[in-house]
């Protein structure tokens, strides 16, 4: 592990984690960042093949618990985002991307850990919205965007 700016000056501290390949060379697998310099990591970035960002995690409120996850495809494009917007330790927002574009967004508005609000996107605009009103896991109401 290699640390940078670890002098407690409030600047971001970055820690690199490596594994040693069979040929003896080092391969980057993770980069940890302490954004506010309090000694606790707030951003975790996971790498494949020593350079390709595979996923990253953020602790938004600096309590040591991850609140946002981003996942990337082979081209480095975002494919999925998971977030705990209410900061209660339970995911309540899911976003799915295709070719870097948002195609679906799900929200847990009731706080039971299960999505009950679904947005389907096409070409950068909401196409339809589904809502599970009674929390049984199936959509009860569909709202479709008027097409002009
Ligand atoms: Ca920190
Ligand atoms: Ca947190
Ligand atoms: Ca939550
Ligand atoms: Ca329902």
Image (tube, rainbow, N blue to C red):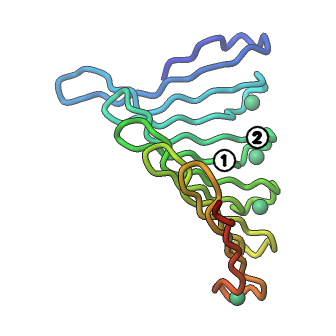
Q: Are marks 2 and 1 in contact (CB under 8 Å)?
A: yes
- Which quadrant of the structure image shows residue 84? bottom right
Distance from Cα at disc 2 to Cα at disc 1: 8 Å
Residue 118 located left or right of residue 103:
right
Question: Residue, x 81% and y 59% (percent of image)?
Answer: 88
On screen, 143 above or below 1? below
Which residue is disc 2 drawn over?
60
Q: Nearer the viewer, residue 114 or 42?
A: 114
- Confirm or reject: label 2 Cβ below 8 Å from ligand 2: yes
- Which of the image's four quarters has the C terminus? bottom right
Mark 1, other Cα within 10 Å: few <14 / some 14–19 / many ≥20: many
Question: Residue, x 66% and y 83% (percent of image)?
Answer: 139
On screen, 59 above or below 37? below
Which residue is disc 1 drawn over?
68
Please, which residue is most extreme toward the front here?
148
Mark 2, other Cα within 10 Å: few <14 / some 14–19 / many ≥20: some
Q: Position of residue 49 (x, y in %)?
A: 31, 32
Question: Residue, x 17% and y 24% (percent of image)?
Answer: 23
Q: Nearer the viewer, residue 63 or 82?
A: 82
């Amino acid at each position: 592990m290699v640390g940078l700016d670890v002098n407690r000056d409030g600047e971001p501290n970055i820690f690199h984690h490596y594994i040693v390949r069979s040929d003896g060379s080092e391969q980057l697998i993770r980069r940890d960042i302490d954004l506010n310099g309090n000694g606790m990591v707030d951003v975790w970035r996971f790498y494949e093949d020593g350079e390709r960002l595979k996923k990253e995690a953020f602790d938004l409120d600096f309590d040591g618990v991850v609140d946002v996850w981003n996942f990337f495809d082979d081209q480095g494009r975002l494919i999925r985002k998971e977030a705990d917007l209410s900061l209660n330790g339970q995911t309540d927002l899911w976003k799915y991307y295709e070719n870097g574009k948002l195609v679906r967004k799900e929200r847990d508005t009731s706080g039971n850990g299960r999505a009950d609000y679904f947005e389907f996107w096409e070409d950068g605009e909401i196409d339809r919205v589904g809502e599970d009103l009674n929390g049984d896991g199936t959509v009860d109401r569909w709202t479709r965007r008027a097409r002009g």
